[in-house]
Every structure is written in C-alpha cells, then in structure tokens.
Amino acid sequence: MRIIPASEMPIHADGSAFHLHLKPEQLSDRIILVGDPARVNTVADYFDTQECEVSSREFHSITGSYKGKRLTVISHGIGGDNIDIVLNELDALANIDFKTRTVKPEFKQLTLVRIGTSGGLQPFVPIGTYVAAEKSIGFDGVLFFYAQNDKVRDLDFESELAKQLKWKVTGLSPYVVSAPSSLVEQITQKDIIRGITIATNGFYGAQGRELRLPLHDPDLNRKIEAFDFEGHKITNFEMESSALAGLAALMGHRALTVCCIIAGRVDKNMNTEYKGSLTGLIETVLDRI
C-alpha cells in the first residue's frame, strides 16, 4: 500500500490539510463552493447551526446544518489553480487517512455545487439570469496534468469546438467535461438555464477583454458567440467551472457550477452591484443540494 509522503500531501501538526486548514471530521459530504471568502458568511447565515469556522488565506470554511442537512461552505478564491488546490485537499480529507497517509479502502463521494458570477454570451442569458454549466469548456489546461483525463472529456465536442473557433492559441487546447446528469437534474429547474460555460485562465485577455495589450485572436469572442453544435450554444464565461468539473469527474465526485450572470458581453453592460442578485441563487442551491 502506497504511503503518501509529506512533500506530496503536507499536513499541519494539528492534523489539518495544508491550505484549507480543515480536519477530516470538519467536512460534510455536501459542499457549497464560492469564490469570495466574505460570501461564505452570506451562505452560512442561512444555517440553523454552525459547528466550526476556519480561515486560511483565501480559503474560508464553515460547516453547519440547514433544514436537517449537514453542509460545508468553502471559498476557493479566483481561478482554476485554486480549484486544483481545493479539490485535491477536499478529496484527501474524504478519502485519505491522515494518520497513515494511505488511501482509505472505502471511497466517499462528495457533492459539490459552486455558486459564482459570470459574463453572458447570448441574448437569452441577460444580466440576472442563473446558468448551470451542463458542460464546461476549459481554456485553463489544468486537467491535462492528470492521467486518463480523456475518459471524462467530451472528445467529439472538443473537435467541433477547435474547428468552429479556428483555434489559434498555440500550446493550449480547450477541453470539455459534462456535469453529472443526476446533479443537473437535482439542482436545475425552470429557474436555472442549462448552459455551456467557458472557464478561462484569466479575466482580461483570456476572455477577450482588450485594455492596453492587443489580443492574439481578436475574433475569438465573435466565434464563441456564433458557435453551435447540435443546437447547443456557449452561454457564459467564468474562471473555475472546467477545473471543478474535470477534477471531480476524475476523482469520482459529483460537481456542478451555477452562476448568476452579472455582465452582458454582447451588449457590453455590467452590474457591479451584483451581490444582492446572488441571494436567490444561494437560497435555491441550499434547498436543492
């Protein structure tokens, strides 16, 4: 049996995970993920009870109960690199014995729903719309560092994507991962659109925003907006859904990203006072997770 060395999985002296500072007993198997550490309190304010609260860097966690369900809410910060940290440590907390540093014989599946914000790419997803990433397109490359990633990717969709976008970014290939249909059914109803979400490895150039630096492919967003594969259109941009979907699928967990649209990339409008718009989405996810 492989013993995982300290250099591969650092553990604090108190028995907590290196970045999250959580201990295995502090984690629920139902987890809500948010980007902003302050948003953790917004979600946890709905809890009936709170049993623990832990903060470390951008990672803020609260575990408690809501209508009889034990839940953990965790902030992950911005970007797929942070998702890589959070997902690996959450999986370790659930499925690795921290005392022996060995994988537990029985697998524990986690259900993870990320509540985020996003930019809409179609007229049918205006500001204020809730969109679930039924498919996530990764412009981040995170998944390619893990073996057998092709088993969780939609290769036909990827091929059509590269063709229609006339992909020009060398050294980086978009990948596509579907969310579990069971979780999509559980979380989405008529109030949440099932869409296709692109997660990028940046907020500006990677999402087609041009400030002082010119873009490598100025037409990329136009091609993204025009993309159509078997009647499916790309609905929105954000920065974490693909890493979450891909890593969770490889690990055997259930994960889904649901976003509130706060920017209209086609109409070029933006709601910077969006925090109130998230309240309804938080309440919905809490009731359905």
Image (tube, rainbow, N blue to C red):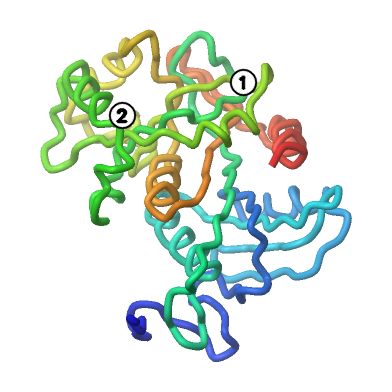
**167 sits to left or right of 270:** left
Q: Which mark is residue 208?
A: none
Q: Give the residue displayed 36% in from the left and 81% down from the top.
A: 4
Label 2 sits on a secondary structure element that is loop
Residue 74 sits in quarter: bottom right
Name of the residue lying farthest toward the front: 105
Residue 270, x across and y down, in percent: 55, 24
Name of the residue lying farthest toward the bottom: 13
In the rendered image, the vertical position of residue 181 relative to residue 144, given as above or below? above
Label 1 sits on a secondary structure element that is loop
Is there CB contact under 8 Å for labels 2 and 1?
A: no
**191 sits to left or right of 33:** right
- Of tags 2 and 1, the one toward the viewer is 1
Residue 3, x across and y down, in percent: 36, 84
The residues bearing labels 2 and 1 have C-alpha atoms spaced at a distance of 25 Å
**65 sits to left or right of 179:** right
Label whose residue precedes the other's in the sequence (2 or 1): 1
The residue that label 2 is drawn on is 210
The residue that label 1 is drawn on is 129
Q: Give the residue displayed 56% in from the left and 25% down from the top.
A: 131
Residue 138, x across and y down, in percent: 33, 38
In the rendered image, the vertical position of residue 42 relative to residue 178, given as above or below? below
Q: Give the residue displayed 43% in from the left and 63% down from the top.
A: 88
